Image: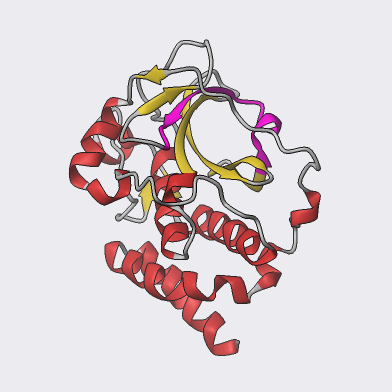
Amino acid sequence: MRIAISKFHDAVHALKRGIGGLGLLSGLAVASLAAMPNLASAQTLASLPSVASTISTTGAARPISAWVTFCETYASECAVNVSEPATISLTPGVWNTIVSVNRRVNKSIRAVTDMDQLGMADRWDLAESGAGDCEDFQLLKRKLLAEAGLPRRAMRMTVVIDEKGEGHAVLTLITDRGDLILDNKTNSVLPWRQTGYTFIKRESQNAMAWVSLGRAASPVTTANR
């Protein structure tokens, strides 16, 4: 275990150095997450609400423009395999992996807007530079969780209006305990109703497309940190 923890720390440091770290973290660290329950000690599976709550979809929605560009570069990150499970079964081991990945990515990536980092309003990527804004955090979390064995189809990028009234991206995990949210603004994995956000739209589970989640107007970008 001491060796595994040391390698995990090395992987996190490598992630901060760029894309080489992404590969190391993907191939080495995530495989050992479920063996380190202390990382998730602040949150337990039993703490989730006993009654599962899911977000209702209300038809097709227009994708975020930066997502379209992202999918042209990272096609495998956007592909939908309908043979995969549409729901994640939350075992204690899976829960620990989710909480651990959420925390580690939140800790390892420096939050910066696309305008400050790249001089552009909105760009989606996997935070290869070691820095990024909201959607980059969530895309990296999904990549790592998928590599840990969770079905990508049950992990959907989602656009919300946050507490500042701005467009924001989170990752929705569709589970047998309800829809849970991974967010770079908190290390807690929250049921969607507890976030305080207005949910606008998310990726479809059935195609490379988006579906609407509510009646509020959709933001053009998800460019905040």
- Count of marks placed on residues: 0
Q: Quadrant of the N terminus?
A: bottom right
- In the image, residue 57 above or below residue 32: above
How is the protein colored in the picture?
secondary structure
Tell me what residue is drawn at x 48 percent, y 45 percent.
155
Could you say where residue 73 lies in the image, as x and y percent from the top left? Answer: 19, 45
| Viewer-proximal residue among 213 and 117 | 213
| Viewer-proximal residue among 42 and 148 | 148
Which of the 4 image quarters holds residue 156? top left
| Viewer-proximal residue among 43 and 106 | 43
Residue 176 in sight here: yes
Tell me what residue is drawn at x 53 percent, y 89 percent.
3
Magenta span includes 98: no
Could you say where residue 179 lies in the image, as x and y percent from the top left? Answer: 61, 38
- Seen in the image, is 30 located left or right of residue 18? right
Q: Which residues are magenta?
A: 190-205
- In the image, residue 133 above or below residue 24: above
- In the image, residue 172 above or below residue 44: above
| Viewer-proximal residue among 76 and 7 | 76
Tell me what residue is drawn at x 69 percent, y 64 percent.
92
- Seen in the image, is 184 located left or right of residue 84? right
- Seen in the image, is 12 located left or right of residue 67? right
Q: Residue furthest left?
A: 72
Tell me what residue is drawn at x 33 percent, y 30 percent.
209
Magenta span includes 199: yes
Could you say where residue 23 lies in the image, as x and y percent from the top left? Answer: 32, 68
Residue 133 in sight here: no
Could you say where residue 217 lies in the image, as x and y percent from the top left? Answer: 46, 10
